Image: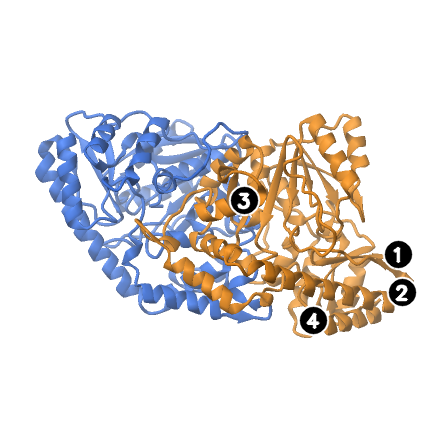
Chain colours: A orange, B blue
């Protein structure tokens, strides 16, 4: 998922308390110091590359209004559909459309309250306390929190620019580790932006099948690509769960995601969803169904991809020009993030403090480690700023470095 | 909550699978036979008293449209607010309004994806596996499912027309039972419609305080009343959690609920919500905030109460006239339900089959027991049908009886 909880926190400063709670299952991710620093990025004088937010201003307002009008106009025997209770697994038009896209039957799709909910329900469905979940580290924090809430035992394996190091996974298995779940963001990983290579995809599926692990493929960024197409994991392994989201291609505030996978997993998620929130809001599902089928989505995606690519190039070029061989930064072919690796040993936790003093924000790699240890990496979002502001952000980062 | 999962199921027939799943935590409530029968209530020739749905057609469409327009017009530094990520605990205007209503600070309120999510997050926050949760039986199914998902041990105590039998709770405590949670629908209980008496309220709080139990007060129906005002439990006991909902007073399809309570519980729920779904959809919160503050809500509530009361009287009167001393039925002073008790020993599971054959539906009391055992009770909703249709439903029930 491209949203991550740190970013979410950044944009969500409210009166929330931070006192220790009675929770037996709660997040333990992210050092409080980093969170405190990231609280500062909303200052108007800060160029924030720290967000995990898409640029919702790229959505055509007239199109959004039309979708809401259509949602409000829908009526059924129980009154206005948008206002009434709906089916737990999602409204039929949305499930049918998604099923067509995913090459499954409508009964194989559960609509969730954002893909974050799919991860939470999957963690609760698939993991007994102490079960092992393997994921690539650096990791998407929302997945870490969801699996930790289910009292799973998380094991990180390293990744590189071709995604998760599946040989490291193989070594774990050779050592007797039997993961219940392997969680993977195969396309435009958050935070690294990497794409899992075809060879590693095949090997991952083979390893998972061998030990009966469920592969959870988080495809939140899959449609925000401008590189060569990849082959999804879904439909290839015995037990692959595909998790999708409208957050990166439409609007995260709608909170509409979905999942599909083996029949027993779909049934378990649907049953647990019933007590989790009854169903995802009806109006939001109607809006997403309308936007995905109104005929304008291909052009919108095209524009989103073109704009994102331009921004990624602008930021990567500016960073290379200014920071030179102090860093390594690759231009991704999708998603929202650049992954910057300091070659001069810079601790990015410390860099963040200096960067904020110079009016630019990024997320230190420590935020994506399982134990919060400092790193020499950082995640930089190119999703929301125009190219000239990205160049200015690179200037500021250069001065801070 | 007035929605319940059986009703929800009724209105939610889709392609969902029913195969046994891999869930370690899933619902075990409701006999499959009852569910099969209730699948029939959507037939157009059936007068359904089985729903747990409010009558959303009582909402003024112009008012709803204005609320959506206001939601879509809100913008911030991150683009259109309705479309962007928001704070985990809820948007400030809604939390501030609710805090004012509840007599707490905005930091004490968490907005949830329906009050069902509040119950789910509370169950996960407050209950370790095997912890005891006491509730009134017959019980709201959504609460049963939420606490069972957290592997709590549910103990039912009986209730009557004055609500939960707190002496039965006292006996349990005298016997050494130490509940982690006492769950109570003190106002217009689902399914019985009862209101917890003032004396029992005081005794419940005293018992809970004595053993350190958290009282979860589910106030979903609290604002749909036409009887004398009651005194909420919230704010009176040491550890009382208040759960509220917009579903019965505005529209359940929006899925906006909320909770407040002791600081540590609020913090635990907020932390767990982050991995559950990041936040409740932004647009929906903006819509509810607008509807609760647009100045028209008092008149809307007045109309909802008047209409509901008329319907409750129409149904109760017709049932008494037709079924006579075969049943006991009291006119409630709030909520959406009549609770019918057969004095002639009629098994209401069997009655449902006959009723459907005569074109009328109700929910047998067995659906609200912890073990699904047959009963001589039934829940009848007066919320959605006009008085003349309620009378016709009573006619049909008389013929079926």
In this figure, which residue is indicated by the disc labeled 3?
Answer: A100
In this figure, which residue is indicated by the disc labeled 4?
Answer: A386
- Residue under disc 4 on the same chain as residue under disc 3: yes
- Residue under disc 1 on the same chain as residue under disc 4: yes
In this figure, which residue is indicated by the disc labeled 1?
Answer: A345
Quadrant assignment, res A235:
top right
Observer-nearest residue: B145 or B136? B145
Q: Earlier in the sequence, mark 1 or mark 3?
A: 3
- Residue under disc 1 on the same chain as residue under disc 2: yes
Q: Earlier in the sequence, mark 2 or mark 3?
A: 3
The reply to whether the C-beta atoms of the residues labelled 4 and 2 are less than 8 Å apart is no
Q: CA distance from mark 2 to mark 3?
A: 47 Å
Give percent across and percent down for residue A368: 72, 50
What residue sits 63% from the left and 55% below the top?
A3
Q: CA distance from mark 1 to mark 4?
A: 30 Å
Examine the rendered structure and indicate whether residue A139 appears above or below residue A49: above
Examine the rendered structure and indicate whether residue A357 appears above or below residue A33: below
Q: Is residue A144 left or right of residue B302?
A: right
Query: Which label sits in the foreground, 4 or 3?
Result: 3
The reply to whether the C-beta atoms of the residues labelled 1 and 4 are less than 8 Å apart is no
Examine the rendered structure and indicate whether residue A258 appears above or below residue A288: above
Q: Quadrant for the C terminus of chain A, please.
A: bottom right
Q: Earlier in the sequence, mark 4 or mark 2?
A: 2
Q: CA distance from mark 1 to mark 3?
A: 48 Å
Q: Is residue B276 left or right of residue B350?
A: right
Element carrying mark 4: loop
Query: Which label sits in the foreground, 4 or 2?
Result: 4
Q: Earlier in the sequence, mark 1 or mark 2?
A: 2
């Amino acid at each position: 998922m491209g949203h991550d909880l740190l970013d979410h926190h950044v944009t969500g400063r409210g009166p929330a308390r931070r006192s220790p709670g009675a929770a037996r299952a709660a997040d333990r991710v992210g050092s409080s110091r980093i969170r405190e620093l990231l609280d500062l990025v909303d200052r108007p004088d800060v160029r924030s590359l720290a967000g995990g937010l898409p640029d919702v201003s790229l959505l055509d307002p007239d199109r959004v209004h039309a979708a809401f009008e259509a949602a409000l106009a829908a009526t059924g025997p129980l009154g206005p559909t948008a206002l009434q209770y709906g089916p737990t697994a999602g409204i039929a038009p949305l499930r049918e459309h998604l099923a067509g896209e995913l090459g499954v039957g409508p009964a194989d799709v559960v609509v969730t309250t954002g893909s974050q909910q799919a991860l939470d329900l999957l963690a609760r469905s698939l993991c007994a306390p102490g079960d092992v979940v393997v994921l690539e580290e650096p990791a998407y924090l929302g997945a870490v929190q969801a699996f930790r809430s289910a009292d799973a035992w998380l094991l990180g394996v390293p990744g590189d620019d071709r995604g998760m190091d599946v040989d490291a996974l193989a070594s774990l298995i050779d050592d007797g580790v039997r993961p219940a779940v392997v969680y993977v963001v195969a396309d435009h990983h958050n935070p690294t932006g990497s794409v899992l290579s075809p060879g590693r995809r095949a090997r991952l599926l083979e390893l998972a099948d061998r030990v009966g692990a469920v592969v959870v493929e988080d495809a939140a960024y899959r449609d925000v690509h401008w590189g060569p197409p990849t082959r999804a994991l879904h439909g290839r392994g015995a037990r692959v769960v595909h998790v999708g989201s409208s957050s990166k291609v439409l609007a995260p505030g709608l909170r509409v995601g979905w999942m599909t996978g083996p029949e027993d997993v779909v049934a378990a998620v649907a049953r647990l969803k019933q007590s989790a929130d009854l169903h995802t809001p009806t109006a939001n599902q109607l809006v997403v169904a309308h936007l995905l089928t109104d005929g304008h989505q291909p052009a919108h995606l095209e524009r989103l991809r073109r704009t994102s690519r331009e921004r990624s190039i602008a930021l990567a070029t500016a960073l290379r020009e200014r920071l030179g061989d102090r860093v390594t930064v690759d231009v991704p072919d999708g998603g929202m993030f650049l992954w910057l690796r300091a070659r001069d040993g810079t601790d990015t936790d410390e860099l963040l403090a200096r960067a904020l003093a110079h009016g630019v924000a990024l997320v230190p790699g420590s935020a994506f480690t399982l134990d919060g240890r400092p790193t020499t990496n950082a995640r930089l979002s190119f999703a929301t700023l125009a190219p000239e502001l990205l160049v200015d952000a690179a200037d500021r980062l250069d001065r801070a470095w």
